[in-house]
Amino acid sequence: MQPDLFTPIRLGRYSLKNRLVMAPLTRNRAGAGNVPQAMNVEYYRQRASAGLIISEGAQITPTAVGYLGTPGIHSAEQIAGWKNVTDAVHSRDGRIFLQLWHCGRVSHPALLPNGMLPAAPSAIRPEGHAHTMEGPQDFVTPHELTTDEIAEIVNDFRTAAKNALAAGFDGVEIHAANGYLIDQFIRDGSNQRTDEYGGSLKNRSRLLMEITAVVTEVWGSDRVGVRLSPVNPFNDMRDSNPQQTFDFVANALNPFNLAYLHVTEWGCTDPADFDFHQLRAAFNGTYMTNGGYDKASADAAIASGATDLVAFGKLFIANPDLPERFAADAPLNTPDVNTFYGGNEVGYIDYPSL
């Protein structure tokens, strides 16, 4: 019998009750001090029937921030706030990983301590703008990191991983996608370095490998995942040969024996542009996909072996009981895009369950 969304699966040291994953979703609703608050606890509790929840990105330090109202994992208050979230998810027999996040150049001095410049592999200003308390402001030319500063960031990931452990998470996901710092190092459109962190594929992926090494030291490799986005142009990202680049990265991650590789297909407008099956074949472990799937397309992808798990974003925003609705072939709530980012409980914890 072919597997589908409701076939249990082993993920690292865990047995998941289904293969529906709640994708990491920035919702800009953290409290003062970027601390998870009561409505965040309820939001995740409502969605605990997912086989796995991957939290929204959590900044590893104050210097990693790129957006207003996004939670961190670097203060005692933030750890305590997240502990309330993990307790709530576990009370419903759910599993939750924390996504570790550094925004890199996709930030603004108005969002960072002492008005500092955002950090990046190279001093290349991305097109676009940041949302600040003063409104939208154009991105600035970032500060090119020194090798000593890169080492500090690797250590910041180690500390954040320890903080996630203290907050009661079941594991962590390293955010190496969507134009944020690690992705900025991987893709040659944003990395023009000539030292050991630039040029060759090995050098451009070095930061991800160093971060993965320290995070797996904290957690054990069977409780760590990595997220990639080979063709997503978000945050002014591009690469001269994404297939070669990301096949290399997936293969280079194999020795870590990770819990999973999470690949978002967003940005792929023509299947001829990128072969996700080839990328999946380059990675030896459990594979998770994301990118506009519904129940039928997700079941088909799992049955064909194209993926092991499917992460859902917008559908989980609007349907806190998405697994139950899929199981019953019940109608789905329609997501309200106007309440995706920021605001209060409306469009956040008031979507009805069956």
Image: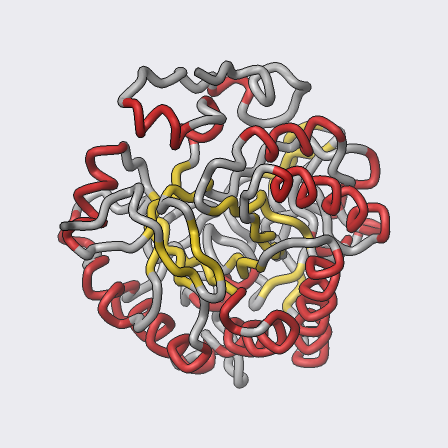
Vertical comparison of 16 with 206: above or below: above
The residue nearer to you, when weighing 321 against 332, is 321
Is residue 268 rendered to the left or right of residue 340? Answer: left
In this view, the residue in front, 225 or 234, is 225
Of 215 and 155, the residue lying toward us: 215
Q: x, y (%) of residue 256?
A: 46, 78
Name the quarter where the C terminus is drawn.
top left
- Residue at 64% over, 25% down: 342
Residue drawn at x 61%, y 14% as measured from the top left: 346
Q: Relative to residue 126, is residue 246 drawn left or right?
A: left
Residue 130 at x, y percent in the picture: 62, 38
| Residue 290 position within the rendered picture, expressed as x and y whole percent measured from the top left | 35, 45
Count of marks, rendered view: 0
Give the quadrant of residue 343.
top right
Which one is in front, 194 or 176? 176
Q: Is residue 7 left or right of residue 187?
A: left
| x, y percent for residue 179 | 48, 53
Q: Look at the image and name its color scheme.
A: secondary structure
301 versus 68 height, above or below = below
Task: Kindly identify the residue that appears in the image at 20 percent across and 65 percent down.
Answer: 278
Q: Is residue 61 left or right of residue 268?
A: right
Q: Is residue 177 above or below residue 338?
A: below
Within the image, what quadrant is residue 20 found in?
top left
In the picture as drawn, the residue positioned furthest to the bottom comes out as 196
